[in-house]
Structures are given as structure tokens and as C-alpha cells.
Image (tube, grey):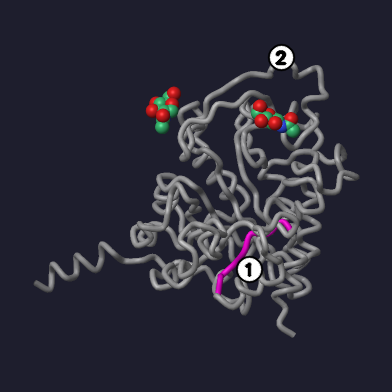
Amino acid sequence: MWFITALLFSSALAKPTSAPYLLTQNRPFIIAHRGACGYIPEHTLQAYEVASYMSADFIESDLVPSKDFQLIVNHDNLLNETTNIDLLPQFSNLHTTKTIDTYKGNITETGWFIEDFSLNQIKELRAKQRLNFRPKHLNYLFQKITIEETLNWAINENLERIKKNKKLLGVYIELKYPKYFNSKGFPVQEMLLGVLNKFGVGDLNSASEKCPIVLECFELETLKYFSEVTDLPLVYLIDSRIGSNQIEEYSTIVHGVGPDLGYVFDLGLDGTGFIAKAHSNELFVHPWVMRDDILPEGANAEEMYLKLLYENADGIFTDFPDSASTYFSTE
Ligand SMILES: *[C@@H]1O[C@H](CO)[C@@H](O)[C@H](O)[C@H]1NC(C)=O
Ligand SMILES: *[C@@H]1O[C@H](CO)[C@@H](O)[C@H](O)[C@H]1NC(C)=O
């Protein structure tokens, strides 16, 4: 009998993280979503630098592979939403249509796809704001970057912080469409682990000393794989297609969940109660995404940040890290 009980308990065992950099905080972590992209074109070193000045605890990097197996920081594999590629005639022959097998099902898109470009070609592009009502004066100035450039910058920033005895800046990394890229011959999970190890941040101990790392994904298979090969903290991203019914199962694989804000506010998903439910399963909760300039109808940014604070959200992805920092400071 004791044996069956032990089995039952172990099969439902949650995996709370022992990451020191996720334990010590008296307010939600500020995760600069694609950098300070409310102000600066997303996923550029400049967007990350500004986020760092704005008291972000983490900058977020989404990754997709180039043709020559570099991990490029970009929200997805389409290049036209955030660069000037449509203005560069040398790339017009690479305009094409593809079907991408994602966790949301197959998506067919027409445009320029990162995996058809070499890193050198990607470096010819210049970044622009995705949302056309955001500041445009910094469009077409900054380059696209790789995860290696990002880590190099963050680790150097942290060397300065260590000298000043300041809290380290972390990098919160998402692999985009890993199943799709695996099917196209890009082993993106191994590529990422290779880069993390090359920079000496592939496990919890070394990441704690040099640069806090969190790995996030919408695909549970990839997180399962990571859970077997690294002790870095893992976050399962949840939207309405994935849902929160299996939260106990998630807790056996990952350390935290990143739900759509609709799970925290009453925006037509599960509504409230999500954070407490996740916490009772020993999962930390980092919802996405606060966009102060695109709020749900009738909502106000200050009230939303304060609700995240009072409901004990463990972090928040935001396009406006300065705003989170202001509302979370309790003095
Ligand atoms: C998406 O496309 C792939 C290959 O083209 C196919 O194997 C898969 O079943 C499709 N998925 C869905 C959900 O339709
Ligand atoms: C980029 O391409 C996608 C897919 O064709 C399209 O939906 C989108 O409107 C384009 N965006 C811009 C800014 O050109």
C-alpha cells in the first residue's frame, strides 16, 4: 500500500525551481517584452539597453534560425513586419509562401522567411516598429541581432553590475516553432543549448553567477526535452488554445507558466483565480503582455499593474518596463 501511495505522489510531483534569481523579489519581475519595444524597434540591442536602464529584471529574446544555423532574435520567421526588407530589391527573389506547422495548427503566410536568409544577409536589414502608432523616429537605424550578440551584451552589462554590486540582468529566451524548424532540419533546441554552454550560462549555477536565464516555449515537447538536459528554469506559455486544465501535468515538467493576461483579468478566458491555482501547484506565474497603449476596453494601465502586484503575480511581460517599475515601486 505504501508503495502505491508513493508512486501516486511521485507521479504528481511538481518541480519547483531552485533558481536563486527567481526567488528573491518583493514585486513581480519586470520582463521587457522584446526589449523596451513600446519605445524602440523590438528585438534590437538598443531596445534591450533602454529596457536595462528602465529597471527591467529580464530582457526577452524570441529565436528563429537563419539558413546558416545562427539563432536570430525575431518574434517569428517573417521578416517584413519589423524590418525594411520590402524596400530592398536584392531580396525580392526570396519572397515566397509557406505553411508553418505551429501549436495553433498550420498557418500559411506570404513574405520573407528568416530560414531562407544567411546571417550576413540579415545584417543588411534595418529594424522598424511593428505597430505603426509607436514612435517611428528610430526606424531603419538598428540591425537585427543573434542570441550570441544578446548574451555577449548581457554578460558584459552584468560584469559592470557585479562591480557595482547591483542585481544581474537576465535573458528570458523563447524558441519559436521548434517542431516546425526540427522538421526542416534545424535542431533549434540543441543549437540553443550549444550557445548557452559556449557562453557559460547553460546551467543554473553558472547562469546565477553570470546572467540569469529562463527558457520559455508554447510547445511542451521542447520543454520536456530541456527538462532532461538542463536545470535552467522552464516556463510553459499558455493561451486559450492550450488552456489551464492540465496545470498539474505542466507542473511535473516546467517550473512556471506564462499565461495570456486573460487568465489573470476577466477577459473571457478563465478569469481570476489562475495565479492561486498555479501557485498551489508550485508553479510561478509570468503573464503576458502589458501594452499600456493597447488596453482591454475600459481598463487602465495603473489598475492592471496594481492588480498583478496584489494578486502576487511573480512577473509580467511588458512593452513598457518603465511603467511597470513605477507602479510596482511601493514607496
Ligand atoms: C500541418 O501540416 C503538416 C505537414 O504539411 C501535417 O503533417 C499536419 O498534419 C498538419 N497539421 C494540422 C493540424 O493540420
Ligand atoms: C508582412 O507579411 C504578412 C504575411 O504576408 C502580412 O500579413 C503583413 O501585413 C505584412 N506586414 C507588413 C508590415 O508589410
**Residue 251: image x %, image y %?**
38, 62
**In the image as oriented, which residue stretches furthest toward the bottom?**
331
**Does 68 appear above or below 270?**
above
Q: Residue at x 78, y 65 (%)?
A: 54
Which residues, given as a range, are shown in magenta? Answer: 312-319
Instruction: Ligand 1: give its quadrant.
Output: top left
The residue under the point 40% across, 50% down is 224
**Residue 45 x %, y %:** 78, 49
Q: At 78% from the left edge and 73% from the top edge, which residue is drawn?
A: 164
Which residue is under mark 2?
A: 93
The answer to whether residue 80 is seen in the rendering is no
Residue 131 seen in the current view: yes
Amino acid at circle 1: Phe
Q: In percent of the image, x 76 and y 61: which residue is there? A: 52
| In the displayed structure image, the side of residue 73 where residue 245 appears, left or right | left
Does the magenta portion include 32? Answer: no
In the current view of this chain or complex, which residue is farthest to the right? 137
Q: Which mark is residue 304?
A: none
Which numbered marker is on residue 29? 1
Assign the C terminus to one quadrant of the image.
Answer: bottom right
